[in-house]
Image (cartoon, rainbow, N blue to C red):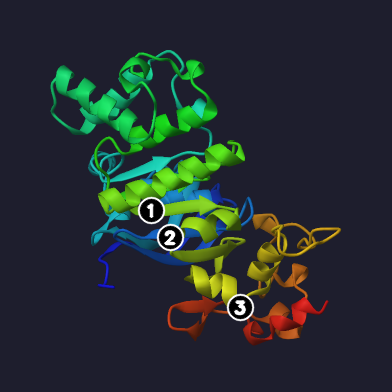
Amino acid sequence: MTPMDEILSIEDLSISFGSRKKRVEVVSRVSLDIKRGEIVCLVGESGCGKTVTALSIMGLLPIPPASVDSGTIKFNGVDLLKLNDNQLRSYRGNKISMIFQEPVSSLNPVFTIGEQIGEAIRTHKDVRRAEERKRVIELLDMVGIPGAEKRYNSYPHELSGGMCQRVMIAMALSCDPELLIADEPTTALDVTIQASILELILDLRDRLDMAVLLITHDLGIVSQIGDRVYVLYAGKVAEQGSVDDIFSNTSHPYTYGLLSSVPTIYEKKEKLDSIKGVIPNPEDFPEGCRFNNRCGLAVQKCFDDSPSLFRIDDEHYSACFRSNEIDKLKNE
């Protein structure tokens, strides 16, 4: 395989929320990169900082109360954090697009889907109305909406949740972006629709050579379409590596817990495994390793010191002092 160009590089990104008197860090020194044509998955429970990280790429964080305290976000070598609002608009929706969690609430109920996709095109491209309509219909057809020409004049409430998600994908692709950020794109959809949306994302990635940052808590989705994975816990990267690394050579107790909680047809269990406790509030992140109060391998060092990412193999890293002892959890 020939090396892919790095399209996005995030280094030491830290983000906090609050007022001048009190600020709470919700993302801590996160680094990740995405190559052209690659699907990178950002995984973790709700509240781990996944969506905040994605919104920072798009320049959509509410500032204030949010603040990017350190780090760089480079897209094709340009640090997006140094751009002003006008400069960011030329990237947002044009070179970088995002699909949000709730497709129905993301669409304006008083405008047709044709008008809404067309607006995204007009914002970045100088096209005539007839060209715009033709492009919208092509996009609707591309994302698998039957009767695309008739659906041009449909309103969001006339479409199913799966169809609305396809409309959002069409809108995101309207200007041929180089990077697509998909934030839990199948959360509100049933299993069969989920599968078709994931297949669509894979097909579009292959057809357009587009990079994808997929945000999800569903490791089943990761195993189906991901190339590399970053596991986020309490605002920090706990483990990163290829899909094979994460699934076959798990090297962090949190990742192991996530994998163990996924039901499988190959093993009969009366009760699914779960990670004890809950993810802490950012105001109450523990000292040392942030996973220590939920970890079955924690020792005193885990409460005293915060682990950096240790190299396991090639591009596989884990932020765990006992990464080589994960097998002990299987016997608990």
Where is residue 277 drawn, in percent x and y?
Answer: 79, 60
Q: Counting residues from the N terminus, which is met first, the one under dot 3 or under dot 1?
A: 1
Quarter of the image with the N terminus is bottom left
Q: Counting residues from the N terminus, which is met first, the one under dot 2 or under dot 1?
A: 2
- Locate residue 63: give its quadrant: top left
Q: Which mark is residue 40?
A: 2
Q: Nearer the viewer, residue 252 or 187?
A: 187
For mark 1, give the secondary structure: strand
6 relative position to 190: left or right: left
Where is residue 126 drawn, in percent x and y?
Answer: 13, 28
Disc 2 to disc 1: CB gap under 8 Å? yes
Q: Amino acid at mark 1?
A: Val
At 76% across and 77% down in the image, what residue appears? Answer: 330
Q: Residues within 10 Å of mark 1 (few under 14, many from 20)?
A: many
Where is residue 86 drawn, in percent x and y?
Answer: 24, 39
Name the residue furthest front: 266
Q: Amino acid at mark 2?
A: Val
Q: Residues within 10 Å of mark 2 (few under 14, many from 20)?
A: many
Disc 3 to disc 2: CB gap under 8 Å? no
Marks 2 and 1, how far apart at CA: 6 Å
Q: Is residue 135 above or below residue 47?
A: above
Marks 3 and 1, how far apart at CA: 25 Å
Name the residue furthest right: 270
- Locate residue 49: give its quadrant: bottom right
At 56% across and 62% down in the image, what residue appears? Answer: 232
Q: Nearer the viewer, residue 276 or 327?
A: 327
178 relative position to 52: left or right: left
Disc 1 target residue? 212
